[in-house]
Amino acid sequence: MTQHTRTLDMIPLWLQISDDGSSATLSLEKGENGILLHEDNRGDFEAVLGEFSLPSFLLFDMPSEARAAAAAINALKTDSFGSESPVAGRTLNGEGLLMVFGEGSLDIDGEKLQVTDHRTQTGYQLPVYLSWELQACECDSALLHQAADRIDLAFVLCKKIEETANPAVVRSLQSLLQKLPGASVGLPLLEMSDLQEDIELYEEIDSVQLQAALIRYADKLDCSDPIDALARHLLETFPGQFRQKLHADEPMI
């Protein structure tokens, strides 16, 4: 199937109804029996949705920011929020999403629900719609798209980590990120401690320029031998899942 570029971001709203039909909740996650609300079916659940307090939505760069905001709202318990607890979740791209409930009841034919965007604005954000504002085919298309359409998100997260101003945290994070499935594995990893064993570093050296010099040097290294060694290691470790490629100039064995 041809992969088309996503032209909008969608906040999926799922209706969770108990097996006996005695209770219902509005959720940001599908769960086991979630019904995705869209323009074509929201009228079927008008009576159920009318029982909910009026929701609004807040967008953040990271899910942890949404959870922190939810904890702050619960701690403050101001009158501007309803009695229902806020619900933290994630967008389709892995950003932070928070649903809060205010005074008044939900009216599917009333004014458009409020969506407040607290994400770092870099110019790459797409228009955001609630799923029940879109037709079913548009929702299906958004759900089928691969994540990471927000190409600036990695840059934004790096800038947030940089704000810690702690090089030790950055190096530890690099090591931990390599353990995540799909992450790049550095061959080799250069650390400042390696350099300090043999050369003296002066404080006036700009850290950004020094890091750039390390990256340029690492990019020029020939890693073909280590990669060959890695391939042999994988063949030995996973004999049933890996096999060596045969090239046109190699005889069949």
Image: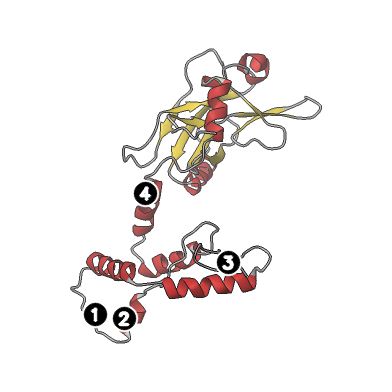
Q: Is residue 229 above or below residue 170?
A: below
| Among the two numbered marks 1 and 2 on one chain, the one whose residue lies closer to the N terminus | 2
Residue name at image x 43 percent, y 44 percent? 61
Please give the residue where the numbered disc 3 appears in the rendered image: 244
Q: Residue furthest left?
A: 204
Label annotation for residue 227:
none
Mark positioned earlier in the residue sequence (1 or 4): 4
Q: Which residue is mark 4?
A: 156
The colour scheme used to paint the residues is secondary structure
Q: Which residue extends farthest bottom?
A: 198
State the residue in front, 233 or 149: 233
Q: Which residue is mark 1?
A: 201
Q: Is residue 85 left or right of residue 203?
A: right
**Disc 3, SS:** loop
- C-alpha gap between disc 2 and disc 4: 29 Å
| Alpha carbon separation for disc pair 1 and 4 | 30 Å
Report the front residue among 88 and 183: 183
Q: Which residue type carries mark 2? A: Leu
Query: Viewer-proximal residue, 107 or 160?
Result: 160
Is the residue marked by circle 1 packed among few (<14), some (14-19), or many (20+) residues within 10 Å?
A: few
The answer to whether the residues at label 3 and label 2 have Cβ atoms under 8 Å apart is: no
Residue 5 x/y as whole percent: 44, 33
**Residue 195: mark:** 2
